[in-house]
Amino acid sequence: MTLLASGPHPKDVMISVFGASAGVAGLVLVFVGLLITTIGTYPGGTSKAALRPYRVGAWAATGVFGASLATVALSLSWLALSDSHWLYVSALVVFGGLLLVLLILAIAVTRATV
């Protein structure tokens, strides 16, 4: 007898989204710290124009960190409180957006600083 696979179980998907989002949040937080440390290495009289790419990158990365935490909250809410379809879809959409914004951030900061 062969069992037909109907795709991953929603709980498994939410556990994966929860873990991946928390991982992204941690990595982005390290990246924010790196950018802030880089800003701190410049002398006090450095022009705002020279520091601008690092500051913009740090604030953008902070926004991505917030999006990661929002995804963690959505997936945790689904796991802990409910198995509602709209919360499941919302978590997946926000996670997909998070990955896209993370790619855009990496490209933008690389272009601005290299």
Image: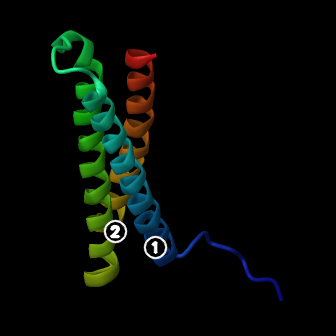
**Quadrant in the picture for residue 69:** bottom left
Q: For numbered disc 2, what is the local secondary structure?
A: helix
First-in-chain label (1 vs 2): 1
Q: Who is closer to the viewer here, 49 or 19?
A: 49
- Residue 67 falls left or right of residue 1: left
Outermost residue to the bottom:
1
Q: Who is closer to the viewer here, 53 or 70?
A: 53
* Vertical arrangement, residue 16 with respect to residue 93, above or below: below
Residue under pointer 2: 75
Residue under pointer 1: 15
User: Which residue type does callout 2 highlight?
Assistant: Ser
* Vertical arrangement, residue 36 with respect to residue 71, above or below: above
Q: How far from the left and from the top, in percent, is residue 38?
A: 33, 31
Q: For numbered disc 1, what is the local secondary structure?
A: helix
User: Which residue type does callout 1 highlight?
Assistant: Ile
Q: Residue at x 37, y 37 (%)?
A: 101
Tell me the quarter of the image containing the N terminus: bottom right
